[in-house]
Image (cartoon, helix red, strand yellow):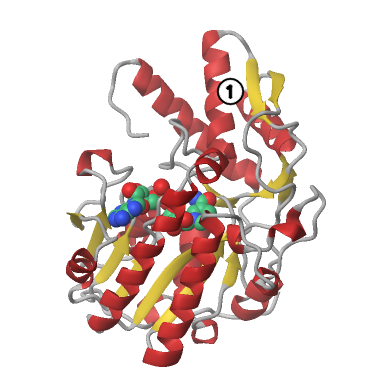
Amino acid sequence: MAAKTPKRIEDFRGKDDLLVVTGAGGFIAGSLVRYFHDKGFARIRAVDKKPLAEWYQRTPGVENLVLDVSSPENCAQACDGAVEVYNLAADMGGMGFIERFRIECLRSVLINTHMIEAAQKAGADRYFFSSSACAYNVDLQKDARSRALKESDAYPANAERGYGWEKLFSEMVCQEYWAERGLKTAIARFHNVYGPHGTWDGGREKAPAALSRKVVEARDNGTYAVEIWGDGTRTRSFMWIGDCVNGIDMIMHCDELIATPINLGSCELVSVNDLLGLIEDIAGCKVERRYDLTQPLGVGGRNSDNTMIRRVLGWEPSTPLRDGLARTYAWIAEQYALRKAGRKVVL
Ligand code: NAD
């Protein structure tokens, strides 16, 4: 890999510059807030529409605002004084959610439309948008052995209905704010992100969390049986949350990537069966696999082609899935035990 030193937030900002992060009651943005806090940034505004008690993480010393950023007035309030804006708010979930609730997913277009306008009016210097691998043409992902997706594969456009089209449209909005109004926008197409402090139950969780919880449950209730959506042969890659927040920082502060969508994902491809096998190893038990072919499945195979991120940043997400899963499994097992003991946990 080329020896490069990508720029990071501290190369551009003083510790008193105001950073605004939306979706901060959720998984990735909550971890991003902690990342900036741990770097010593003193003025962070975390924004989410959920009541504070339902936020997955609350970082000490951060200004937490409960605001729905799908309206222009609330976006203006959220962005007031911001130097950098990270917009990660979206109505979102795993396959079960995005296939069943396309309207909710499409309505996230209001969030980016109003947030970017408010960020620009507030005089912010840089704006980050969390796009998704769901923006890619689904025809290229029919097979479990489909080739990895490169950035140019989003066009000709045939994104995932609902969620994917919203992301693709919002990417274009970000590109035009740079072209016409000079707002420096950064666009990362995340491939499945996993780790502690994410959704692990309730219907919006993704495969690593869902399977980890099912194994914890199967051990606990003594059935040692786990239901799998589909036949387990579909393939995906999964990115550790620590790689994700690092990547967001580097992409946001790379001038070569302004208004340029880029993959942010792992290229360690596994099938759902492989994923469960790793979790079994971590849990130290074997489970019976019960395949449910009636559930939503998503595309046949999806992986991240990391040629561009390696070329531009000299870096790519590389935490081995086994290592990140061990930490995720331990966290979910702990949450499960706390809930069982009657302690309130946030899903
Ligand atoms: P998440 O559901 O944990 O967090 C999203 C947060 O946005 C939630 O807390 C929700 O309450 C908040 N939100 C939704 N609508 C809002 C509104 N109108 N106003 C204010 N807050 C609002 O999801 P996540 O996994 O942390 O995802 C963050 C971003 O990354 C999203 O844009 C998502 O589409 C994108 N993404 C995530 C993944 C992944 O694997 N997790 C993959 C691709 C893209």
Residue at mark 1: 215
Q: Which amino acid type is shown beneath numbered disc 1?
A: Val
Visible residue check, residue 242: no
Quadrant in which the N terminus appears: bottom right
Determine whether, in the image, residue 205 is placed left or right of residue 123: right
Q: Is mark 1 within 8 Å of ligand 1?
A: no
Question: Residue 339 location, x and y as percent?
Answer: 35, 21
Residue drawn at (52%, 78%) of the image: 6
- Give the vertical position of 71 relative to 59 (above or below): below
Residue sitting farthest toward the top = 222
Quadrant in which the C terminus appears: top left
Question: Residue 125 location, x and y as percent?
Answer: 32, 83
Residue drawn at (39%, 82%) of the image: 11
Residue drawn at (51%, 59%) of the image: 244
Number of marks in the image? 1
Determine whether, in the image, residue 297 is placed left or right of residue 36: right
Determine whether, in the image, residue 32 is placed left or right of residue 102: left
Number of other residues with Cα within 10 Å of mark 1, as a class: few under 14, some 14 to 19, many 20 or more: many
Visible residue check, residue 218: yes
Question: Residue 92 location, x and y as percent?
Answer: 45, 49
- Give the vertical position of 95 relative to 282 (above or below): below
Residue 327 vs residue 340, the one in the foreground: 340
Assign a secondary structure to mark 1: helix
Question: Residue 55 location, x and y as percent?
Answer: 29, 43
Residue drawn at (41%, 71%) of the image: 128
